[in-house]
Image (cartoon, helix red, strand yellow):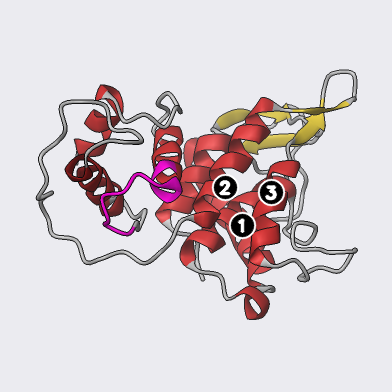
Amino acid sequence: MKTSKIGIDLIESFEGYRDNAYLCPSGVWTIGFGTTKYPNGEKVKQGDICTLQQAHEWKAYDLLRFEENVMKFYTIYQHNQNEFDALVSFAYNIGSIDGLTSKNGNPGKRNKTEIALAMPNYNKGRDKYNNLVILNGLVRRREAERALYLLPVSAPNLINKNPYPMPSTTIKKGSAKKDVLWLQWELNKRGYQLVMDGIWGPKTKAAVLLFQKNKKLVVDGLVGPKTKAALSSG
């Protein structure tokens, strides 16, 4: 399996692009899109610089390593695409999914429900005093990865034009079925693969939160004017 565009966008949205080496919260020199070690095996060091093209090349190389880490558990979990993308993003940040899948120190023993429940626990890093603290950025990343991990991949075939009119009001829990159907259609067009049922449930809300994060919108789960505009723009 390979990481999809949704997974890559998720990784890039949290890693960000840096053309100068910097110390991450774990005290490791990092550059580009979260690269800590170059393809030749050398570690990133203070003073290193890069171009955007180099950063993308290193990211692609890093993805191979983390995809391999996730794939070694494939025979156990039979990951679907959303699960795979979420786990690769997790490994890209943490280093592997070995601990995430472990029960009593044995990798691969947690079931999928237990993995989803454990994800939010990996939200800590070091502050400037070297104390282990909860980092808001990691809290948000774990929420986004967990939301993607739990998203279904059973979507209907989509037509080219949304058959439902764009709602004039904010879409949220309790909205009319036709309004939620417009939202689900637009999200599915972007690969989120929701069941088209017109129901504002946890899967639809999770997809909205992830979309808002990827588009750098206010992540509130409310589909107001800005989120609707982003959804309808191509």
How dense is the environment of label 2, judged by Cα within 10 Å: few (below 14), some, or many (20 and up)? Answer: many
Magenta segment includes 24: no
The percent position of residue 148, horizontal first and vertical second, equals 50, 51
Frontmost residue, 6 versus 122: 122
Q: Amino acid at mark 1?
A: Leu
Label whose residue precedes the other's in the sequence (1 or 2): 1
- The image's mark for residue 87 is 1
Label whose residue precedes the other's in the sequence (2 or 3): 3
Frontmost residue, 67 versus 163: 163
Q: Amino acid at mark 3?
A: Met
Separation of residues labelled 3 and 1 (CA atoms): 10 Å
Magenta segment includes 204: yes
Q: Tag count in the figure? A: 3
Q: Which residue is mark 3?
A: 119
The percent position of residue 76, horizontal first and vertical second, equals 67, 78
Region of the chain picked out in magenta, as a range: 195-205
The percent position of residue 176, horizontal first and vertical second, equals 22, 39
* Circles 1 and 2 in contact, beta carbons < 8 Å: yes
Separation of residues labelled 2 and 3 (CA atoms): 8 Å
Describe the element under mark 2 as helix, strand or loop: helix
| Image height of 123 relative to 46, above or below | below
Q: Main secondary structure of the magenta part?
A: loop
* Circles 2 and 3 in contact, beta carbons < 8 Å: yes
Residue at screen point 80% across, 57% down: 99
Residue at screen point 36% across, 29% down: 222
- The image's mark for residue 145 is 2
| Image height of 142 relative to 99, above or below | above
Which quadrant of the figure contains the C terminus? top left
